[in-house]
Amino acid sequence: MVLSIMTTMLNRIGPFLQTVGRALSFVWQSSPSLATASVVVRVIQGLLPLVVLYLTKLLIDAVTEGLKTPWDDASLTHILAILGGVAGVASISALLAAVAGLVSKIQSEVVTDHMYAILQAKSVEVDLEYYENARYQDTLHLAQQEAPYRPTAILNALLQMGQHTISLLTMAVLLWWMHWGVIPILILTGIPYFLAKLRQSNQLYVWERERAPLDRKAWYVNMLLTQAGAAKEVRLFGLGRRLQQWFADARLVLRQERIALERRWMFSGLVAQIIGVAGAFGVCSVLVVRTIDGLLTIGDLVICLQAVQRASGFLESLGQSMSSLYESNLFLATLGEFLGLQSRLGTSACPKAFPCPITEGVVFDHVSFQYPHEERVAIRDFTFSIKPGEHVAFVGANGSGKTTLVKLLCRLYDPSGGRILIDGTDLRHYQITDVRSAVSGIFQDFVKFQLSAKDNIALGVRASGVDPFAIVQAAKQAGVHETIERLPKGYESLLGKLFDGGHELSIGEWQKVALARAILRDSQILILDEPTSAMDAKAEADLFERFHELAQGRTAILISHRLSTVKMADRIFVVDQGQIVEQGTHDELIARQGLYNSLFLTQAQHYQ
């Protein structure tokens, strides 16, 4: 077992040092001054034990000498001076401990915020497909759990190791002077404890990696029970007890396995500590015998006994610090794995300038796409063109592939086959940010931002300090201005019920807010993915009467399964099972007596 642990450590020494270096760079980047202060304080704390022991020796020797001879003022003054020194060192030690604690807490907060910023930046950077991958979700879950505090833990472990090493070296010099054999005994009897702690760190890391999916499931079920998103269904269908049982079952497995690990660790740690105690007891016995033989004074014996006790404690603390460092290194490797994720969207070495305005239009040239880890092909051989300023609609049943083509146009994914061209240039030859800046719109699963009405709409543009007049105009075009004006604070009113003082909107009103956000953005292509699915008939009619005005001067793409909403489009594409099966104007498609005509008549029956 010992050989296995040592082999594992040797194999990981390179990645270990690399991860430690990365963690220290995170700490240094977050606050160089705090990092420097931590190091200075720990070095001083590491030297203080030697000073304390030396003063203790002087005090005991002075008292012993005073007992042999009559007391005088000089002896008393000498003893009081030593006591003053001990008190001074104790005061300095207390001050340094308080300063170290304060610096550590401040640094922990600063580093945690810095790590959250890094995690959030990477989460925004990675491709959309990662969010549809369970393995990525496990990695993100572990990174979110461990990364915010592990760099600070690594720094603290290194500082403690440095402090304990300095103290151990001072103790070693003292004990070597007493007898050279003391040090090997203490080291040999301390090794079992060190190896036991390393084994614990390995087992904990492996267990948490293996149980990340179950832990994430428990977290998800807890979210269903405690957050607003599922509150209605939980109550309507009486899901509370069932979800609670699922959570309890998952937590029972995790708890029982963790307790079993803790039991094993307790027994192995206890055995290792008993070996260390036996070694320290043997050393103390040798020192007592040497004192009886007259080789050491009483002061020498006391300082040696304290040195042995402190050395044993420092060795144990050093083992804990090294174990903590090793454990943090293992878990921080998950952060390295997360930060190492690379975008799978191709980038051009020499990207072309995005056309402004678009003069030739958008072309899908035999485009096919299959989602990662899925066997089904989402869209197959999509070939069509959209002229600048043209308004087109894609209609078809749910799951036919309509929304997928929008994701491809926004470069949230790249096609599995074929090309998407804007003004004759493949999208992959433009900067991704330029492509996405040219597109605006709302998805069916739009976000209801729990912010003020003004900020909800202003999120449509990147710049801060958006003109309030422009926000109001966008709200008017989307038909939500009057709704916002009726709120107690108008555009400053908080939307949603997540925070105190918020005002909930109907789903249709929320959708209009999202539409205003899309309108505000100065984009060349406007995409409306099922934009009226939550609106009543009158609101839907009002919105589409202004449709051409809203998209004036822009290319507009409307995704819908309601055929009554797309009659005014310049062209309509009918999508069925991932393929375009018909295209034309509304009248042309009705006259063709094909799938569009059949769907239109079927839907029309519900309004007759």
Image (cartoon, helix red, strand yellow):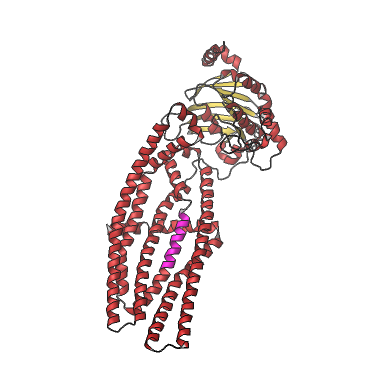
**598 left or right, relative to 322:** right
Q: Is residue 551 in view from this perspective? A: no
Query: The C terminus is located in which quarter?
Result: top right
Relative to 266, residue 570 above or below:
above
**459 left or right, relative to 123:** right
The spot of residue 447 in percent (x, y) is: 56, 34
Determine the main secondary structure of the stretch shown in magenta: helix
154 drawn magenta: yes
Q: Quadrant of residue 359?
A: top right
Instruction: Choose between 82 and 393: the one closer to the eye.
Output: 82
The spot of residue 247 in percent (x, y) is: 39, 37
Relative to 377, residue 339 above or below:
below
Q: Quadrant of residue 423?
A: top right
Bounds of the magenta span? 150-164
Q: Is residue 35 in view from this perspective? A: yes
Instruction: Choose between 529 and 357: the one closer to the eye.
Output: 529
The spot of residue 532 in percent (x, y) is: 59, 24
Instruction: Choose between 106 and 587: the one closer to the eye.
Output: 106
The spot of residue 200 in percent (x, y) is: 34, 54
109 drawn magenta: no
